[in-house]
């Protein structure tokens, strides 16, 4: 099996040289070149056809994001592995969207860098675990927010008054008319009137159907 051909792209000479020495000591990996900026990197990708580009994000001129986009568009057989100091989730999200196969921070252990290069070369996805945890937390937050916005839109479409929403929530919680009246300091007769309007607007026949409707539409938990 032939060696994995790696191109190192970083604007810091010492880091490039250190990485190159580290990788050359590892069996099965050959460093085919080093580039100090994005333009040089793209020229060398075209010329050398590396298997993996080890890519920084912040570089003069063309940054790593632009380089990654171009590589993925014009050289789909070359995989991109980001090695950077930036743990900003927006960078991680962008690299996922572009199709970079890996994302590591520069404080990673040398053997981890080697291991991830091999995984990426084999077509696997290898993002630093704690970065992915943050991305997933953000994704969950957006899901919750999206659900909240959907609920707000659904409520708006139903044209319910604030009082009707209060009573609907109490119905979902299983409260009786008397308990609702006591909680809102209104008469049972007023509660019944509001419930009649609720059933009409929701186009359901009774309190149970109203509760099921509200929960199924995400209006309340």
Image (cartoon, helix red, strand yellow):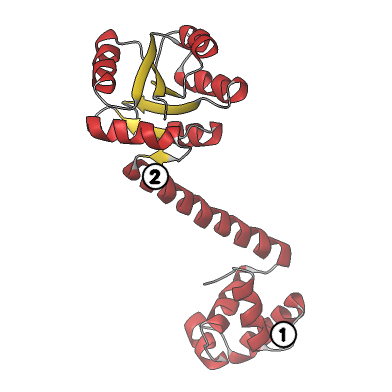
Q: Is residue 125 above or below residue 57?
A: below
Query: Considering only vertical position in the picture, is 174 above or below 3?
Result: below
- The reply to whether the C-beta atoms of the residues labelled 1 and 2 are less than 8 Å apart is no
Whole-percent x, y for residue 126 in the image: 40, 40
Q: Nearer the viewer, residue 117 or 156?
A: 117
Q: Position of residue 127 (x, y in %)?
A: 39, 39
Q: At 49% across and 31% down in the image, what residue appears?
A: 100
How many neighbours does mark 2 have within 10 angstroms: few (below 14), some (14-19), or many (20 or more)? some
Front disc: 1 or 2: 2
Using the rendered image of the protein, determine whether residue 67 is visible from the camera's viewpoint: yes
The N terminus - image quarter: top left
Left or right position of 196 against 49: right
- The residue depicted at 57 percent of the width and 19 percent of the height is 70
Residue 6 falls in image quadrant: top left
| Left or right of 37 in this view: 20 | left
What is the distance, in whole Å, between disc 1 and disc 2 at their CAs? 49 Å
As drawn, the label of residue 196 is 1
Residue 87 appears in the figure: no
| Location of residue 107 with respect to 169 vertically, above or below | above
Q: Secondary structure at mark 2?
A: helix
Q: Residues within 10 Å of mark 1 (few under 14, many from 20)?
A: some
Residue in the foreground of this view, choosing between 195 and 56 = 56
Q: Residue 148: which quarter of the image?
A: bottom right
Compare marks 1 and 2 and give the one earlier in the sequence: 2
Instruction: Kindly state the secondary structure of the residue where label 1 is placed.
Output: helix
Q: Which one is nearer the viewer's eye here, 219 or 73?
A: 73
Q: Position of residue 86 (x, y in %)?
A: 34, 28
Residue at the spot of label 2:
132
């Amino acid at each position: 099996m032939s060696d994995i051909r790696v191109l190192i792209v970083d604007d810091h000479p010492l880091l490039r040289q250190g990485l190159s020495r580290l990788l050359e000591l590892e069996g099965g990996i050959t460093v085919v070149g080093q580039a100090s900026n994005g333009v040089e990197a793209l020229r060398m990708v075209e010329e050398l056809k590396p298997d993996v580009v080890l890519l920084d994000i912040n570089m003069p001129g063309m940054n790593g994001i632009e380089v990654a986009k171009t590589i993925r568009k014009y050289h789909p057989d070359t995989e991109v592995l980001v090695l950077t100091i930036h743990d900003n989730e927006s960078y991680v999200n962008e690299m996922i969207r572009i199709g970079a196969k890996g994302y590591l921070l520069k404080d990673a252990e040398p053997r981890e860098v080697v291991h991830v290069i091999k995984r990426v070369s084999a077509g696997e996805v290898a993002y630093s675990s704690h970065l992915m945890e943050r991305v997933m937390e953000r994704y969950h937050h957006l899901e919750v927010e999206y659900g909240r916005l959907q609920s707000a839109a659904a409520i708006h479409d139903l044209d319910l008054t604030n009082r009707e929403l209060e009573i609907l929530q109490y119905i979902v919680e299983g409260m009786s008319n008397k308990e609702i009246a006591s909680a809102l300091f209104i008469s049972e007769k007023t509660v019944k009137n509001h419930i009649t309007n609720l059933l009409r607007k929701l186009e359901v026949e009774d309190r149970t159907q109203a509760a099921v409707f509200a929960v199924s539409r995400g209006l309340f938990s």
